[in-house]
Image: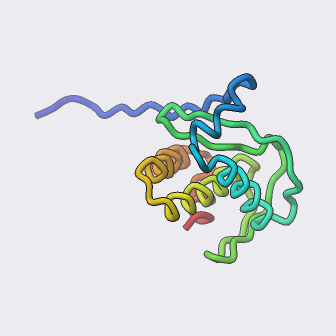
Amino acid sequence: MSTATASQSKIVATVVPGHLRAATLPKRFPGMFLVFESLVYRYLEVFSDNYKGGYWEFFDLSNGGFYMSLNSNARFYLSIASNGFEGEMTADAASLVVNMFAIGQLANQHKTDYLIELYHLLRTFVSEHPEVNRILCAID
């Protein structure tokens, strides 16, 4: 009988420092970084009428994942026609939703293990987010 306990530490999100930003998206999304970035912005434009642009932070996750988060204290009302989701959430939660959509789209198009893994690493991080239920409903 094993007495070992499975202790899992929380995934830590660390802001990518300014001097590393320019290299981050090309490193994370080789050959498709402009497409990824455009998809993130476009999904939020489509899902939320009150998104008008802004500054996005890049976050490296301690589990190997990554996401872009809109630096805003605003709340965003999302309406996602493809799954019927409607609801309000923080900018960070809305950012996670659109990153999941963008990475999911790229993973479906390119069928690369790296993108599939990146999607699952971000999904694991989402499971620890305070708005996990709302995010999961939005990406379902």
Instruction: Return the x and y of residue 70 as percentages of the image width and height.
Output: 77, 45
Q: Residue 100 versus residue 115: which sits nearer the camera?
A: 115
In the rendered image of this protein, does residue 85 appear above or below residue 71? below
Residue for point 53% across, 44% down: 125
In the rendered image of this protein, does residue 110 appear above or below residue 18? below
In the rendered image of this protein, does residue 36 appear above or below residue 62? below
> Which of the image's four quarters has the C terminus?
bottom right
The color scheme shown is: rainbow
Residue for point 77% across, 41% down: 56
Q: Residue furthest front?
A: 31
> Which of the image's four quarters has the N terminus?
top left
Q: Which residue lies furthest to the left in this view?
A: 1
Instruction: Return the x and y of residue 49 as percentages of the image width and height.
Output: 85, 66
Residue for point 52% across, 64% down: 109
| Quadrant of res 21 | top right
Instruction: Return the x and y of residue 3 as percentages of the image width and height.
Output: 19, 29
| Quadrant of res 137 | bottom right
Residue for point 83% across, 43% down: 73
